[in-house]
Amino acid sequence: MLSITKQFRFEAAHAILNYDGLCKNIHGHSYVLHVCISGKKDPETQMVLDFKIIKKVVEEHFLNLVDHALMLNKNNPGISAMAAYEGKKYWLNGEPTAENLLDTIAALIQTKFPEGIVLKSLRLYETESSFADWKPDQN
């Protein structure tokens, strides 16, 4: 099996409610996302998958939803005031941490690739020096 990785960038804001620190306030990040897929090389194209297909899947099923959006926990009772905000919002089933974003991204894209292509890993940089990794459960 071979693996290939495509990198994406997006801008988004979030607030982590009930957090004891500055991140409880709305603030933004320039996120960098690495999407790694694996599969067998196609004998005809000599590629595992065309990078433009990875781009299409990630943009259509994730980036278009969150780029330049305010990401918030839809289950947090303290968030009712933000419901009135008319700008672009993305509601998560949990706090918009890097870890929860990775679980969300995986759930949104892992079944969208062609047959035989597997989502191998995700890496999300929240800052230049802070990132989280996702890999499928090995069970």
Image (tube, rainbow, N blue to C red):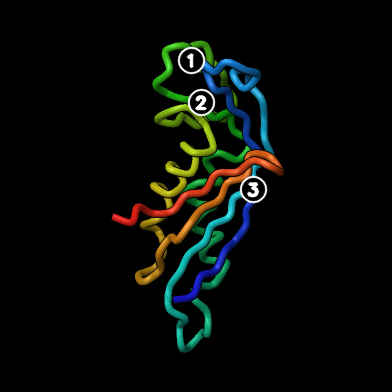
C-alpha separation, residue under disc 2 versus residue under disc 3: 19 Å
Going from N to C along the chain, the mark reached first, 2 or 3, is 3
Task: Determine the secondary structure under disc 3.
Answer: strand
Residue 72: numbered disc: 2
Q: Do labels 1 and 2 touch, CB within 8 Å?
A: yes
Q: Residues within 10 Å of mark 3 (few under 14, many from 20)?
A: some
Query: Mark 1: which amino acid?
Result: Ile
In percent of width and height, residue 33 lies at: 59, 50
Residue 118 placement: quadrant:
bottom left
In percent of width and height, residue 98 lies at: 54, 38
In percent of width and height, residue 69 lies at: 59, 33
C-alpha separation, residue under disc 1 versus residue under disc 2: 8 Å
Q: Is residue 6 above or below residue 122?
A: below
Q: Quadrant of the N terminus?
A: bottom left
In this view, the residue in front, 92 or 24, is: 24
Query: Mark 3: which amino acid?
Result: Val
What residue is rendered at 63% in x and 39% in y? 126
Q: Which residue is mark 3?
A: 32
Q: Is residue 9 above or below residue 28?
A: below
Task: Determine the secondary structure under disc 2.
Answer: strand
C-alpha separation, residue under disc 3 versus residue under disc 1: 26 Å
Seen in the image, is 86 located left or right of residue 74? right
Query: Mark 2: which amino acid?
Result: Leu
Seen in the image, is 76 located left or right of residue 47? left
Q: Do labels 2 and 3 touch, CB within 8 Å?
A: no
Q: Residues within 10 Å of mark 2 (few under 14, many from 20)?
A: many
What residue is rendered at 58% in x and 46% in y? 124
Q: Nearer the viewer, mark 3 or mark 1?
A: 3
Q: Quadrant of the C terminus?
A: bottom left
What residue is rendered at 43% in x and 43% in y? 103
Residue 79: numbered disc: 1
Task: Determine the secondary structure under disc 1.
Answer: helix
